[in-house]
Image (cartoon, helix red, strand yellow):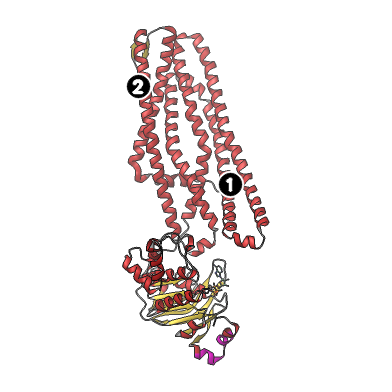
Amino acid sequence: MAPRPSPHVYRRLLGYLRPYRPLLVAGVSASLVAAAATSAYAWVVGPLLRAVLTGDPITVAGVSLPGDALLERLPLLVVLVALVKATAQFLQGGLMQRLGQRVMADLRGFLYGRLLGQPPAFFERRHSGELLTRFTSEVPMVEFAVTQALTSYIKDGLQIVALLVTCFLIDAKLFLFTFIVVPVTVLPINRFARSLKKVAARSQQRLGALTALTAEQLQNLPVVQAFGGQARAAEAFDVEAERYLAEMRRSLFLRGAVSPTVELLGIAGVAMAVAWGARAVAADPALAGRLLSFMAAALLLYQPVKSLSGTLSQVMTGLVAAERLFALADEPAPPDVGEPAGPLSKALVLEGVRATYSDGREALRGVDLVVPAGARVALVGPSGAGKTTLFSVLLGFLPASGGRVLWDGAPLSGLKPSSVRGQVAWVPQEPVLFSGTVRHNLRLGKPEATDEELWEALRLAHAEDFVRSLPGGLDEPVGERGGRLSGGQRQRLVLARAFLCRPSVLLLDEPTSALDAASEAAVGAGLTALMKGRTVLVIAHRLSTVRDADVIAVVEGGRVVEAGTHAELLARRGRYTQLLGEGAVAA
Ligand SMILES: Nc1ncnc2c1ncn2[C@@H]1O[C@H](COP(=O)(O)OP(=O)(O)OP(=O)(O)O)[C@@H](O)[C@H]1O
């Protein structure tokens, strides 16, 4: 069943207005003035027309004006009313738009902040395209709904109320007769609103699926092309695009039908009022002025009603989008609470650690391992053994489902995750860089680092020379994902970034990507420097790294099946010897 915006969504969006109450009050006041000015038109137009046509004296707001004074004062009055209305509308539009933009900025910031607190499992359950759709298409939908609701809905709503009151005051009987059709108008609008909500939710889901598919295919285009998969990709795209089109057809049909239906009902009401009024005036000619005022007010109603019904569908779409955004933001994120972790000084101990992914796969099945502070422990094992999962548990991305991890004797589950991450530097196999400058990338873990500290880190990571030779130095842009640098340069920047954080524990997934001999030597020297004096857990892919380790842990099937030094394990002639024979680590 398609989701529908609940009253809760309106309330929550209204909550975002609270900090801007003065702005809201000013905007609503301007709307009230504009609405009152519109009603004033109706008050003056009827008597004016009647006086012009008959030359009789008229009474406006209790003041009786003779026919000749009219031609001087009434045009002035009309211009004055127009001036007040124009000024009020200008203020109303400006204030409400500003309010709408502030609300949206807050909402966008809130959503992004919530996403930044989510663990990797949250993103694995979703397609990156889906999240992108939220930001690129659903946030603007909410933005439109909020600004539209604040500008058009308040302005038009107040104008409608003011004009209805005007009509009632001019002639209560005529009012009751004419607007007996109003309840009849509300019924179809309500039905439209409900259908529109459903269709809006479905078309947003379809757009999400289409964006997800497109993003995935384009991101991996070289692979698609290498396998000659363009035709299949185009076919899959057409299928999704057709589904989206079908939903949009339904949505556009409904949207197109709202305005004309409301207009028809409104015109019918006015026509009936004219017929009734004409008969009443025939019986009592003095009614003519009032009837003209009444009709002016009824016709002035046309514009705000049309404007309201025209944007109804977009506002509904925006509310559905808001509900989806709130649902995303409300996904519980693991709390960042607990005791602060200090630098590791004794040992990191894993006792029977188990870990299960959200799809039910148990990747760790009782890992026992002791990593003394300052030691270098190499993890080796076949692909899929659970080495990366172990890092995820240590970084707090995946909670242990059994056993425990002790950080200097304190259970990891009781420590504040951000403080543990502050002690740990994680260097993944593929260097991760963001578009931006060298400085921007280095400061990721230490935003306040000075240039001296950056150069020092670059020197330690054997990256100083190449950064100095870049035309912009620290200010040189690295390109998207570091694409303007070589593989070895990217890796050394990532190492420099880790140096800056002064971690006490290093989780290192040794790079395997082919580098030329010079780059490899530089990266290797940087790595050696980084590991010096720290507790290191390294997923080893090179024999030299394994041989130099204090302890080698052989991981297989989610357990540590053997542990010891290189010499001890070779002497045992067990699984380690077998793995070396199979080429699990490169010479
Ligand atoms: N996000 C995930 N969701 C579900 N299962 C996963 C996820 N990541 C890994 N797995 C599974 O968990 C097991 C251990 O994977 P892990 O990535 O820890 O192995 P690894 O030893 O690091 O392998 P490699 O050396 O190939 O990187 C594998 O069976 C894998 O399929």
**What residue is at 46 percent from the left and 85 percent from the top?**
548
Q: Is residue 340 visible to the viewer in this orientation of the structure?
A: no
**What residue is at 40 percent from the left and 66 percent from the top?**
469
Magenta span has 24?
no
| Prevailing secondary structure of the magenta residues | helix
The disc label shown at residue 221, or none: none
Mark nearer the viewer, 1 or 2: 2
Q: Are the residues tagged 1 and 2 within 8 Å (C-beta)?
A: no
The disc label shown at residue 80, or none: 2
Image coords of residue 502 (percent x, y): 36, 72
Read off the magenta span.
567-578
Label 2 Cα neighbours within 10 Å, binned few <14 / some 14-19 / many ≥20: few
Q: Quadrant of residue 489?
A: bottom left
Q: Give the residue at the far bottom of this rendering.
A: 571
Q: Quadrant of ligand 1?
A: bottom right
The reply, left or right, for residue 369 in relation to residue 30 is right
Magenta span has 569?
yes
Image coords of residue 362 (percent x, y): 56, 72
Along the line of sight, the residue nearer the viewer: 89 or 282: 89
Amino acid type, callout 1: Ser
Question: Mark 1 vs mark 2: which is more N-terminal?
Answer: 2
Residue wearing tag 1: 203
Q: Is residue 219 visible to the viewer in this orientation of the structure?
A: yes
Query: Does the closest atom of ligand 1 sit within 8 Å of the Cβ of label 2?
Result: no
